[in-house]
Image (spheres, rainbow, N blue to C red):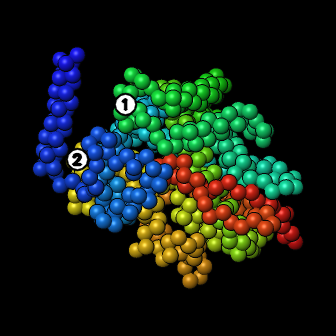
């Protein structure tokens, strides 16, 4: 027993000495960004385990500058807290920072990094992003997207009109958006109470609510093989359930696919694969197996539903909190659209409504800490060295609340985006970055902005939305994890508008 104890002490001492030597060598070789002291291996636990991680790091940047180094367990993270360092890293040195770090949970979720959002920077990644972007642009041609939105919105707005008591808007917006993306990806229009859509919605909500603060196995990966936590086991079960649905939808499309007939996003992927076969492009076909294509579909579906439904929920929250802004949006919609439903041709004239949407995106903080990047070579940012393999993240909350760029950053003010004539300014504000930037900019940005605007315009055109009588706006919000902020539960009352 004594011998075993001595051996254990020797191993631990060796590990500590090795880490110390590694740290000293690294510090001598690189001028690393500054950050607070932490316990080795444990890291800044109070920061990375906090739902308000984004605010804690923003506070640190006041002492350490816009580039802050923190330890996520044994891993080193560099957090960018102002727009200048973000542009330097993600735009000017975009290839350097285009990688993705390896996470144990991400490896499971993406079946070994075969998706777009979480896979590392490579020729395969660029190829899949290209064909996915082409597929998404298909929905911006003609009136395809607006017809889909109008039909989908009418279905749920009619149900909202039947509500006689105050109700949770979140429950409706979740279904609206899930049905919207379901049609885009799978080409099907399902009933409002469809069990398969509800199943996907439940899986997604469970992933956010139950696992939002992260998994221990992402910090110390080998624990998944020795003593996996209950959260990890739950995660594996939910991912398997989700992928089972997507694989089945994909197989159904393969069995009914007709070359040249594009019913939806899955067909767009199959058309791209057929084109590669016709051209004899073996290199493309190697990275277009069923797993890669299912993972691309998963990216588009789940990334699209979350950002859209959270943004719309916040938009309605702000419209009920500030009825004067809602009234101005409705006056504009009535003037521009008239008795018709809002369509793509109206987008350029709905300046005030779009400004309210942009301000909702800024103030709501749907994305607090962005998806992690990784340096694929030694690089620099803000005058500091960032070694190859370092995880780098954008603190979107810090950018969207930076007093250097936003007067009264906690105030909701749509005029920030309008010129003296009430038109949207030709360039977005410098520190407005809800869709990230550089090589990893959000793939669905070009689709998401018109989609959300048309959905919001349809909603405000039909209804006057308010809180129940006697209820004051709830200024609190939920923090499921990693800087994401969602409105606390609130109910609304809708009243059909007289637009004669």
Secondary structure at numbered mark 1: loop
Report whether residue 424 is seen: no
Residue 239 x %, y %: 54, 30
Residue 345 x %, y %: 67, 63
Judging depth in this view, the residue of 375 and 397 nearest the camera is: 397
Instruction: Give the number of the disc on residue 55.
Output: none
Residue drawn at (50%, 48%) of the image: 481
Vertical comparison of 468 with 416: above or below: above
Instruction: Give the number of the disc on residue 221.
Output: 1
- Residue at which label 2 appears: 387
Residue drawn at (73%, 49%) of the image: 172
Residue 332 x %, y %: 71, 73
429 displayed left or right of 34: right
Secondary structure at numbered mark 2: loop
Judging depth in this view, the residue of 53 and 155 nearest the camera is: 53
- Image quarter of residue 169: bottom right
Residue 495 x %, y %: 84, 63
69 displayed left or right of 215: left
N-terminal of the pair, mark 1 or mark 2, is 1
């Amino acid at each position: 027993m004594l011998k075993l104890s001595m051996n254990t002490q020797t191993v631990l001492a060796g590990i500590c000495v090795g880490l110390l030597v590694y740290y000293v060598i690294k510090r001598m070789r690189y001028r690393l960004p500054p950050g607070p002291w932490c316990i080795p291996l444990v890291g800044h636990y109070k920061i990375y385990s906090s739902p308000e991680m984004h605010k804690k790091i923003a506070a640190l940047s006041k002492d350490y500058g816009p580039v802050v180094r923190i330890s996520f367990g044994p891993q080193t993270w560099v957090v960018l807290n102002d727009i200048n360092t973000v542009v330097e890293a993600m735009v000017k040195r975009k290839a350097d920072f285009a990688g993705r770090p390896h996470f144990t949970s991400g490896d499971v979720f993406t079946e070994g990094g075969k998706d777009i959002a979480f896979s590392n920077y490579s020729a395969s990644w660029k190829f899949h992003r290209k064909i996915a972007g082409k597929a998404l642009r298909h929905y911006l041609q003609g009136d395809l997207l607006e017809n889909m939105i109008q039909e989908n919105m009418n279905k749920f707005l009619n149900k909202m009109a039947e509500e006689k008591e105050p109700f949770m808007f979140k429950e409706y917006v979740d279904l609206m958006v899930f049905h919207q993306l379901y049609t885009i990806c799978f080409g099907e229009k399902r009933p409002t109470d469809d069990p398969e859509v509800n199943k996907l919605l439940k899986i997604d909500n469970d992933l956010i609510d139950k696992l939002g603060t992260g998994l221990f196995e992402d910090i110390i990966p080998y624990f998944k093989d020795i003593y996996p936590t209950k959260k990890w086991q739950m995660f594996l079960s939910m991912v398997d359930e989700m992928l089972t649905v997507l694989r089945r939808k994909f197989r159904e499309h393969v069995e009914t696919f007709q070359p040249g007939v594009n019913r939806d996003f899955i067909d767009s992927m199959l058309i791209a694969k057929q084109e590669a076969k016709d051209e004899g492009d073996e290199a493309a076909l190697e990275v277009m197996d069923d797993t890669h294509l299912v993972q691309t579909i998963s990216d588009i579906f789940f990334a699209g539903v979350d950002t859209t439904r959270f943004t719309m929920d916040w938009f309605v929250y702000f419209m009920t909190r500030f009825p004067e802004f809602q009234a101005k949006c409705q006056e504009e919609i009535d003037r521009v659209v008239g008795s018709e439903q809002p369509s793509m041709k109206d987008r350029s004239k709905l300046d005030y409504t779009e400004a309210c949407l942009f301000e909702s995106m800024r103030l709501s903080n749907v994305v607090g800490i962005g998806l992690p990047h990784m340096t694929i070579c030694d690089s620099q940012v803000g005058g500091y060295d960032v070694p190859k393999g370092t995880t780098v993240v954008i603190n979107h909350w810090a950018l969207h609340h930076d007093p250097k760029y936003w007067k009264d950053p906690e105030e909701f003010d749509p005029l920030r985006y309008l010129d003296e004539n009430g038109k949207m300014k030709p360039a977005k504000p410098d520190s407005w970055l809800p869709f990230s930037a550089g090589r990893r900019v959000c793939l669905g940005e070009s689709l998401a902005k018109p989609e959300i605007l048309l959905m919001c315009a349809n909603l405000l055109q039909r209804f006057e939305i308010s809180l129940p009588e006697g209820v004051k706006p709830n200024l609190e919000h939920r923090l499921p994890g990693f800087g994401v902020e969602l409105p606390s539960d609130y109910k609304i009352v809708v009243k059909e508008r007289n637009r004669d």
